[in-house]
Image (cartoon, coloured by chain):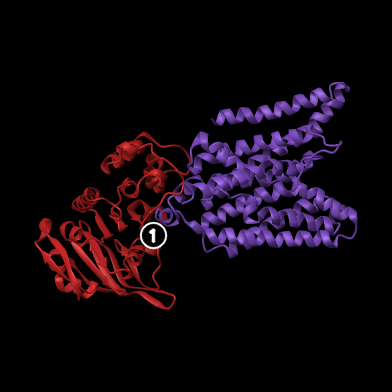
Chain colours: A red, B purple
Amino acid sequence: MSRLVATGITVQRGGRRILNDVSASFSDGAFVAVIGANGAGKSTLLSVLAGLLKPDGGKTTLDGRPLADLDRKALARRRAYLPQNPCCEWPISVESLVALGLTPSLPAFGGFAPEVQDRVSQAIHACDLDDHREQAATTLSGGELARAMLARALVGDPDLLIADEPMAGLDPRHALDTMARLQRLAHSGKLVVASVHDLTLAARFSTHILALSHGSLIAHGPTGDTLSAALLREIFEVEARVSGRGADAAIDFLAPA
Amino acid sequence: MVLFLIAIASGAVWLSLSQILHVFGSNPTDLARLIVLDLRLPRAVLGILIGAALGLCGAVLQGLLRNPLADPGLLGISSGAALGAAIAIYFGLTTKFAYAAPALGLCGAVAATILTFVFGRGGTLSLILAGAAVSALAGAGLSLALNLAPNGTGAYEIMTWLMGSLTDVSWEQVKLAAPFIVVGMGILATTARSLDALSLGEVQAESLGVDPDRLRLTILVGVALCVGAATSVAGAIGFVGLISPHLVRPFVGHEPSRTLIPSALCGAALLLGADVCSRLLPFNGTEIKLGVFTAMVGAPFFFWLVMRVSRTAP
């Protein structure tokens, strides 16, 4: 069943078409890697899918209901969104930062219930941040902060995770960890849509690829069938070699096309 | 920590009462009672209300703008209120209708708020810029009023009132300001959770179900009620809103929601303390105005804050 459906999404900014009639549907259990060159419209598409940006044309539906009609809080409980390079503006502890992910399901006043504490602890543990619990978020390294933000996004157990480059700034081990975590999330029946710059990681972990070029949808399908040298030449204008499949896949860039 | 701050606040009240009793101890008991009940008590109550309102406004605005330099004055609301009340004095409306100054002060605050909101809807930076522009406009209006004041007395009245003071307040003024301040503070208190979410930035806050436009509107209404009412009865009292959140953060942490109530209590304590000091430090027999006193103490703090911000900024 298609959970999230985008139909004819068009976004214009300053006379320029950033997204041009993009239609795609996404099902539960998929980990969709959105790929494309810089400025292809990846971030814009993710904002539209998250219901944070109203497109100039087209609509997005979640379980058949237009995102625009959904109550903000109800949507926030089901969908988590991570922007590119998220930052924290006050020196609050990692624990408090992660707990902010539960904002939509907390009452307007009062402290945290014990089960909330448990969920926060689990999310912190899952993102390998046990040593940083009490540390101020503003003193974390870029990669640690990225993990804390992922924990923040996952703590509310969303059905749908939309993440804009969640791997940016992560060292190889934590990048692999994060990809594996997103893959497990998809395997457990959630829908994950994330823009990914590292194509080898995308080839190994994602179930689907969505390729954008200059605001238009070029390809959308299962990773093994879609991610080809021909596609990479079209969207990145480079010669590339795709070797292996699944967990052994690797992508090398050879020369400008 | 909250209890500790309550203790400070009430301590300031008792301190001021004991000073009064000490000063007026030689007078007949009924006179002392009259002074305590009709002069000192409304002054203290208004001081607590205004201090708490300013402290809360400062904490909320710093949370909203994610800027440690934010203050009710920053959004032009104080200036708007001051201009409104100055117009009342300039046109002599205060002589015809006693509450013209407070009423116009409120109108000024609301007008400044609306202006700031309309021009600052593009986000935090444009909100700060709009606030600066509204401040400049209101400042120009104030200068014009002083410039055109028909006689020295009018100008003097405006100047005196501008300096900010709790002298000569009565229960009437408490009754006039209290409802606005209480309602305004109630409105601001509901924003705590959203302010916390805002520490992740506007986009993430929005993804967590916070409506940034509605939040800005709510806060501007709450701040206008608080600051408009406070400024119109006590004049321009600066820096309390700026300092209070900074004083409580080392104790309660940086989560915006946790600074709100402590900052309000701290603001109340600060203002009461400042009022007591301004009363006890007569200078050639003239009482130092409260607004002048808070500015003298607050401005160096502001310098320190600017230095620290520029040092910690990348």
The image quarter containing residue B282 is top right
User: Is residue B185 among the parts visible in the rendering?
Assistant: no
Read off the residue under disc 1.
Answer: A70
Q: Which residue sits at x=65%, y=52%?
A: B73
Q: Which residue sits at x=68%, y=52%?
A: B78
Compared with residue A86, is residue A138 higher up or lower down, i.e. above or below?
A: above
**Mark 1: amino acid:** Leu
User: Total label count?
Assistant: 1
The picture places residue B117, in percent across and down from the top left corner, at 59, 61
Label 1 residue SS: loop
Left or right: residue B17 compared with residue A79: right
The picture places residue A188, in percent across and down from the top left corner, at 20, 50
Foreground residue among B16 and A68: B16
Disc 1: host chain? A
Compared with residue B262, is residue A256 higher up or lower down, i.e. above or below?
A: below
The picture places residue A36, in percent across and down from the top left corner, at 26, 68
Q: Which residue sits at x=51%, y=47%?
A: B311
Quadrant placement of the C terminus of chain A:
bottom left
